[in-house]
Amino acid sequence: MVTSVTSFSRTGLSDWLIQRVTSLVLLAYFIVIAYQLLGSVDYTSWRLLFDQTWMKVFTLMAALSLAAHSWIGLWSVFTDYLTERMLGPKGNIIRLLCQLGASLALVGYVFWVVVIIWS
Amino acid sequence: MRTPILLAAIGQHQRPYRYAVTNITLRVNVRPTSRDTRPVNLDLGTIDLPVTAYASITHRVTGVLMFFASFLMLWALDLSLASEASFNRLGDLASSPLAKGVTWAIASILTYHALAGIKHLIMDAGIGETMRGGVLGARIVFVLAAISAGVWGLLIW
């Protein structure tokens, strides 16, 4: 049986709220990025943008939001389809392995962003 | 046999009398447990899905795809900021037909996912929560996403 033990915040209500708050951060971030890329962007202006403190903080917030948002979204997908009922006795193992892989990747994403922004 | 999804989801089409005979009101709202051996029909191929279901499934699929696309986007961000030489190298890479296709796909996938997410937020605010509102919202999302995909294509090529 699927339990909430691997959900992001252990309760559906707070996962629901986190999913929405992080979606707004990501939406705002991608709008800013798209706006920049649609203009004529060269290395100097691009570098200058990411050298500003607000952009570094915004990018880190977007990375943390991406991690939380993906965790909650993937948890919903995994616990719906990667189950014993859908996949047989190995369902729980497959789901936990996928969650392990996804969480490692997300930690890697956040770490990668930190390295990109502060190096 | 094709079964309307709502009836299939609550299992009423197979056992119309079960809830009426035992534990009249309580049973209906109890979540099935692992000991529950009643058959569940969630074989999507046998269920008539409304447009809202396709919008929801697409939202999920695009979300999973964005998880993988994030890797490519981070890689591009890394290259773009590492040095002026790598910035220019990324520019050269991005002008190949394959890279343009991938960029278009990621932009379109992300736009669909964002539009479907905005629809969710609007519905959370209590707007369009009815069956008709849900169907209309799903159609609007599909139409806007298709238009956006076209615009992304024009911008990229």
Image: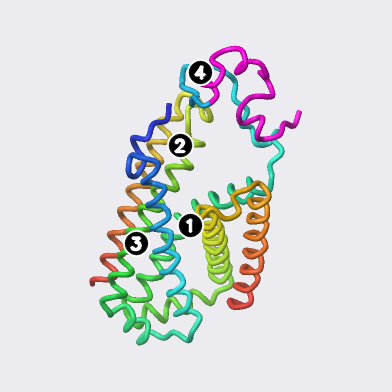
Residue B132: percent from the left, percent from the top? 68, 50
Question: How far is disc 1 from disc 3 in space, using C-alphas?
Answer: 13 Å
Which residue lies at the image location 40% right of the left edge and 53% below the top edge? A69
Label 3 sits on what residue type?
Ala
In-front residue for pair B16/B33: B16
Whole-angstrom CA distance, mark 2 to mark 3, is: 24 Å
The residue under label 2 is A79
What label does residue B36 carry, if any? 4
Q: Nearer the viewer, mark 4 or mark 2?
A: 4
- Mark nearest the camera among 1 and 4 is 4
Say whether mark 3 and mark 2 are on the same chain: yes
- Gap between marks 4 and 3 measured at Cα: 41 Å
Give the magenta-colored segment's residue range. Answer: B1-28
Identify which residue is drawn at 63% across, 74% down.
Answer: B151
Whether pointer 1 and pointer 4 mark residues with C-beta atoms closer than 8 Å, the reply is: no
B37 magenta-colored:
no
Q: CA distance from mark 4 to mark 2?
A: 18 Å
| First-in-chain label (1 vs 4) | 4
Please give the chain letter of the residue carrying mark 2: A
x then y, percent, for residue A65: 36, 58
Q: Quadrant of residue B11?
A: top right
Q: Which residue is mark 1?
A: B66
